[in-house]
Image (cartoon, grey):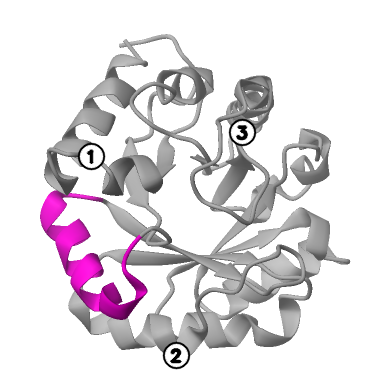
Amino acid sequence: MSDRPGTDRPILIAPSVLPADFSRLGDAVEALDEAGVDRIQWDVMDGRFVPNLTFGPDVIASCRDRTELLFEAHLMVEDPDPLLHTWVDAGCGLVIVHAETCRHLHRTLGRIKDLGAGAAVALNPSTPPEVVEHVLDLCDMVLVMTVNPGFGGQRYIDTMEPKVATIRRWIIDRGHDCDIEVDGGISPDTVRGPVGAGANVVISGSSMFKDPAGLGHAVDELRRLAEAARA
């Protein structure tokens, strides 16, 4: 058994559907399921917190019956609180809010749990880990952004790895049951660093969809390299 932190938690491969053909999202969800992913992430962008617009709850709901995999909603929106229920109603079992957008983060996380979903917090690259230190007891997951949010295909920021390590140490030392996810620029070339630092949920988008050998190969390779980072 590796002595690296967080190795008691399974590696989970969670692709973003952002690079998929938006006219065939249901087919993309089925293809990802067949490729062996563990869950699917929906990047919800409002055109305000980030420049782009993406998926509403009706779009996500329309794909819900195409797989039994967990859907996670990554809410890159300025004011998530009034519409939290819509993402849960759309079939998202995990809802991720950005710490930068929540005036009362503790209350928001509690509301997500009251709605029956898992609760998670995302941190932008410039946001220090201390922002989540005192809400970890409410978190099913912390998402450490390894790019600035809003666009796919960005370059991985390796200086986020110490942030991952810090949060993982807090989780272990305080006995919390909490995953750490990394999102942004994750590929076979970059996955070892954040997993070695303590991440166990890996988001990949552009790299996975562009793999010339197909989605199944992309998933298998990413999982193999992530597991090897723990050895």
The residue at the point 53 percent across, 74 percent down is 54
Q: How crowded is mark 2: few (under 14 residues within 10 Å), some or many (20 or more)?
A: some
Query: Which tag is nearer the camera, tag 2 or tag 3?
Result: 2
| Percent of width and height locating residue 120 | 60, 56
Give the amino acid type for the residue marked by disc 3 in the picture: Ile
Left or right, residue 127 beside residue 200: right
**How many labels, in total?**
3
- Whichever of labels 1 and 3 marks the residue nearer the N terminus, that label is 3
Q: How crowded is mark 3: few (under 14 residues within 10 Å), some or many (20 or more)?
A: many
1 and 3 marks in contact (CB < 8 Å): no
Q: Report which residue position mark 2 lands on.
A: 58
Sooner in the amino-acid sequence: mark 2 or mark 1: 2
Residue 200 falls left or right of residue 110: left
Of 42 and 170, nearer the camera is 42
Contact flag, marks 2 and 3 (Cβ < 8 Å) = no
Split into 4 quadrants, where in the image is the C terminus? top left
Number of residues whose C-alpha sits closer than 10 Å to that of mark 1, classed few (under 14), some (14–19) or many (20 or more): few
Kind of element beneath mark 2? helix
Instruction: Answer with left or right where residue 230 lies relative to residue 163.
Output: left
Residue drawn at (38%, 46%), measured in percent from left and top? Answer: 206
- Which residue is labeled 3 in the image? 171
Q: Tell me how far mark 1 sits from mark 3, CA to CA.
A: 34 Å
Image x and y of residue 155, in percent: 56, 32
Q: Which mark is residue 211?
A: 1
Structural distance between the alpha carbons of marks 2 and 3: 35 Å
Magenta residues span 20-37
**Residue 83 x %, y %:** 66, 85
Please name the amino acid that badge 1 sits on: Asp
Q: Which residue lies furthest to the right in this view?
A: 103
**Can residue 148 be spotted in the picture?**
yes
Residue 43 among magenta residues: no
